[in-house]
Image (cartoon, rainbow, N blue to C red):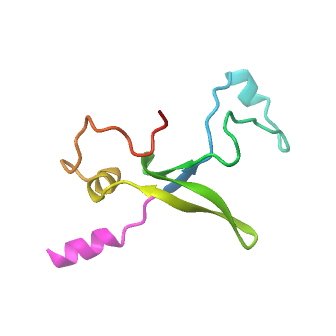
Amino acid sequence: MASDVRAIMSLEVPLIVLLGERRMCTSEVLSLVPGAIVELAKAAEEELTLLVNNRPIGTGVAVKVGENFGIKITFIGDLRERIAALGGKGMASASAEPVGAAG
């Protein structure tokens, strides 16, 4: 059992920082070219959403780390929500509000 837990804890999962969202017509998407700018309806200093497996688990703010960007986490959901985002079954209520969802 302990080896199973170690194996699970070493799995890599996609971590996504959602900057913003925008709906576009297919024709607009097809006309995108390198250098095109897609404007988002979100101020630069607004909180970003932290996703694991496309499920929100927290929020944070953008920071510059050397020549790279990062996220400083300002809120993280509880352990059950994070396990549920990893694909854990029965750990979080299906009716629970997503963590970090904008109201």
Q: Residue at horizontal 36%, vertical 73%?
A: 10
Which sits in the foreground, 23 or 102? 102
The x and y percentages for residue 72 are: 56, 63
Q: Is residue 31 above or below residue 94?
A: above
The x and y percentages for residue 28 are: 75, 25
Q: Quadrant of the N terminus?
A: bottom left
Q: Residue at horizontal 66%, vertical 38%?
A: 42
Which segment is the magenta one? 1-13
The x and y percentages for residue 45 are: 67, 49
What is the magenta segment's predominant secondary structure?
Answer: helix
Which sits in the foreground, 103 or 66? 103
- Residue 2 placement, left or right of 54: left
- Residue 88 placement, left or right of 26: left
Q: Most extreme residue toward the right, as rendered?
A: 35
Q: Is residue 42 above or below residue 78?
A: above
Residue 95 part of the magenta segment: no
Total numbered labels: 0
Q: Residue at horizontal 81%, vertical 39%?
A: 37
Quarter of the image where one finds residue 65: bottom right
Quarter of the image where one finds residue 67: bottom right
Q: Most extreme residue toward the left, as rendered?
A: 1
The x and y percentages for residue 23 are: 63, 26
Q: Residue at horizontal 39%, vertical 45%?
A: 99
